[in-house]
Image: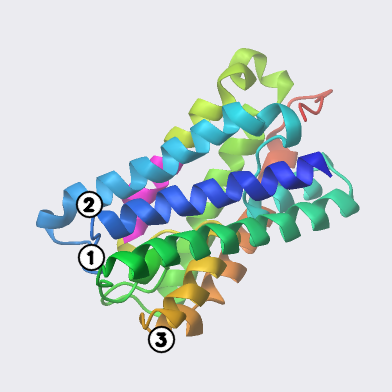
Amino acid sequence: MKKYLAEMVGTLVLVLMGCGASVSLNCSSNCADVVNAGTVLGTGIAFGLSFVAMAYTIGGISGCHINPAITLGFFLSGRMDAKDCVMYMIFQVVGGLLGAAILYSLVMSTGVEFAEAGVGLGSNNLQEGISSTGGLLAEIVFTCIFVLVVLGVTSKTNGATNNFAGLAIGLSLILVHLVCIRYTGTSVNPARSIGPAIFAQLAGGPATALSNLWIFIIGPFVGGALASVIWRIIEPANQEDQF
C-alpha cells in the first residue's frame, strides 16, 4: 500500500505544481505566439522539475511512475505484474484528482480568471488550428518518446544511466512540453489530464476540455504501449529490473 500511496502523492504534486504553473503564468491557448514563449518554457520547466523532485522523493518506494502511460510501459515490458499495474493507475488518477481539487480551491478563492481553451485550470485541449487527429498523433508520438526514455534510463543494463534517471526523465519531460504544447498543451499522462478537465468544468472553463479528454487518455496509452514494443526490440540482453 505504501507504494500505491507514494504514486498518489507524487501525481498530486505533479498536477498541482505543473498545472499550477500554467495557471499562474497564464499560458495562453495560442502557444505559437512568440510573446508566449516565456509562459510555455515556464510551464514545461515546472512539469519537469516536479517529476525530478518526486523521482528523488518516492523513487525508492514506488519507482515514481506518476503516469499511467509509464506504468503501462513497465507492465508490457515485463517489469511489473498486473495487480500493481492496475493499482498504480488507480492511485495515480486519484492523485491527479486531488491535485486538481487543491488547485481549483486556490484559484476560486483568489478570483483568478481562467484563460482560454487548453488552460482552464491547466487542462489539456486541442490548440488553435489542431484537429483531433493531429492532437491524437502528437500525444501518441511524444508519449512514446517520453516513455521510451523512462524505460531506457531505468534499465540497469544501460550502465550508470539509472543513477541519473530522475534528472534525465525530468529534462525529457521539459523537452516534450516545448514541442508538444503547441498541439495539445502537452499531456503524455492520462492522470495529469483527467483531474484538471473535470475541475475546469466546475470552474466554468472550456467545455472542450472534457469532450476532448479521450485524446489525452487514448493517445498516451497507445504511445506507452509503442514505447514498450520499441524497448523490447532494442533492450540489452540480461536486463534487470530496477524497481
Q: Determine whether 102 is above or below 194 in the image.
A: above
Residue 176 on the magenta span:
yes
- Residue where numbered disc 2 is placed: 39
Secondary structure mainly formed by the magenta segment: helix
Residue type at the position of mark 1: Ser
Question: Which residue is rendered at x = 43% and y = 48% of the image?
Answer: 17
* Closer to us: 237 or 11: 11
Tell which residue pokes out farthest to the top in this image: 160
Magenta-highlighted residues: 172-181
User: Residue 193 appears at what percent x and percent y?
Assistant: 52, 65
In the displayed structure, 55 sits above or below 201; it is above
Q: Which residue is mark 1?
A: 28
Is label 2 in contact with label 3 (beta carbons under 8 Å)? no
| Vertical comparison of 56 with 98: above or below | above
Residue drawn 72% across the image and 56% down it: 91
Q: Residues within 10 Å of mark 3 (few under 14, many from 20)?
A: some
Q: Nearer the viewer, residue 80 or 157?
A: 80
Tell me what residue is drawn at x 72 percent, y 20 percent. Answer: 156
Answer few, some or many: residues within 10 Å of disc 1's Cα (few below 14, many 20 plus, some between 14 and 19).
many
Tag 1's secondary structure? loop
Q: How far apart are the alpha carbons under marks 2 and 3?
A: 23 Å
- The amino acid type found where label 3 is placed reads Ala
Q: CA distance from mark 1 to mark 3?
A: 16 Å
Residue 91 inside the magenta-drawn segment: no
The residue that disc 3 covers is 207
Q: Of the residues under marks 1 and 2, which one precedes in the sequence?
A: 1
The answer to whether any part of residue 226 appears in the image is no
Q: Is tag 1's residue or tag 3's residue first in the polypeptide sequence?
A: 1
Q: Secondary structure at mark 2?
A: helix
Amino acid at dot 2 = Thr
**Lower sequence index among marks 2 and 3:** 2
